[in-house]
Amino acid sequence: QTLNKQGLDLILYHDRTLFPVGSVRNQSMKPYQIFSAFKKYAYQQLSLAIPRCFPSPKPQIAIKLPSEYESTVPNLETWGWAAVPQKQQNLWAVTEQHAQQLLDDFVHQHMQDYQQQRDFPARSGTSRLSAYLNCGILSIRQCLAAVFASSQGHFHLENIGQQTWLDELLWREFYQHILFDYPKVSQHRPFKDQTAKIVWRNDPAGLAAWQQGQTGIPIVDAGMRQLLHTGWMHNRVRMITAMFLCKNLLIDWRLGEQWFMQHLIDGDLAANNGGWQWCASTGTDAVPYFRIFNPVSQSQKFDPQGDYIRSWLPELAHLDAKHIHEPYAKNPNLKLNYPQPIVDLKQSRLRAIEAFKQL
């Protein structure tokens, strides 16, 4: 209204998604609930027209507003919060130029091998662009344009790496649409209503051990410590740590969702909620409740030499690749400055399956 009085128009655009939320519907005019169907729709639309990036707007004459609307951008200290430590500031350069350079480097140096490398946390196999996407420094359209530019502008992508990264961008898109079409997921409710009856364990000690990276499961602890120190965690490890909390510890996934949102620099409500509900088997198109990651097996498969574990658990750095994934397995009395596992993986798996069977 103030702008209108000045003879100016305010025009809003959607920029967080490829397709405006609320616009994607199936033949029954209902929102998609299955990712594969959503992806098929997206591929069809993208084959017809790829959303283009717009040039940066030209500088305009400064708009003079009434004094009551004048303000400065506050800093954290103004709000009574602690300043971000310089060490963490150095991890995430906050400029469009840096974000664009990261995108260019990923597209030209890593995207081709993305499908083969993305699940190994000790390698530089992911784009690490999520924080820049989340806060709008980089747009989803810019990412999409980079994908197709690497394929000479054609929709038919040249290799599996390009296609796999596009699919990951579409998972992000899918969860944004789920959040809009099913707002209950933003209200601490599961997507699958029947899973609201799951009896979660009240285990403050277990929750604290998980939060601080002291569970005695090295891959889980490495991930949680990476989160605390950097504000970021590798996606494969996010799935491992999340499933460990809500399946092996049988602790309410919402407590984990909250912890991640408090600490992730790329904390996105839609993606974070979607990922947690996927792991907890409460969400749309979620993993079946009986499919439970074994964190040790995951560790041996995706961090075979233990390099990722060593980088975050210095107390285990001296162990070889054979023993670092479960240091107490062969020798329960081994003297280490590291906790024993707080839960038996086999027994806790059966406990989780039984809890879901009660629904």
Image: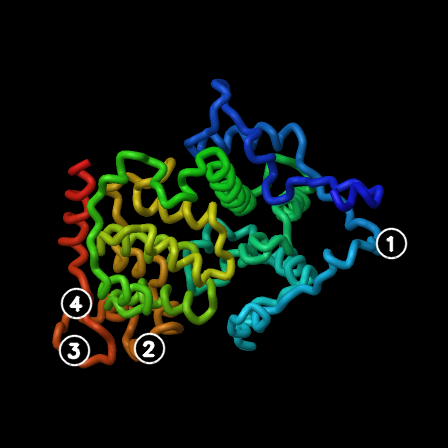
Tally the marks.
4
Q: Residue at image x 49%, y 51%? A: 268
Task: Report the front residue among 188 and 341.
Answer: 188
Residue 61: which numbered mark, if any? 1
Task: Please state which amino acid type lies under the numbered disc 1.
Answer: Ile
Bin the neighbour count of mark 2 within 10 Å (Cα to Cα): few under 14, some 14-19, many 20 and up: some
Which of discs 2 and 1 lies nearer the camera? The answer is 1
Q: Earlier in the sequence, mark 1 or mark 4?
A: 1
Q: Earlier in the sequence, mark 3 or mark 2?
A: 2
Q: Is residue 152 left or right of residue 350?
A: right
Find residue 188 and report its horizontal and vertical position in percent. 37, 45
**Distance in Å between CA atoms under marks 1 and 4:** 69 Å
Task: Report the front residue among 173 and 189.
Answer: 189
**Distance in Å between CA atoms under marks 2 and 1:** 59 Å
Q: Is residue 306 left or right of residue 199?
A: right
Residue 329: which numbered mark, if any? 4
Which of discs 3 and 1 lies nearer the camera? The answer is 1
Provide the residue designation for mark 3.
334
Task: Report the front residue among 202 and 249.
Answer: 202
Q: Earlier in the sequence, mark 4 or mark 3?
A: 4
Task: Please state which amino acid type lies under the numbered disc 3.
Answer: Leu
Q: Return the residue found at the far right.
A: 61
Provide the residue designation for mark 2.
317
**Distance in Å between CA atoms under marks 3 and 1:** 70 Å
- Secondary structure under tag 3 reads loop
Find residue 49 and report its horizontal and vertical position in percent. 67, 31
- Secondary structure under tag 1 reads loop
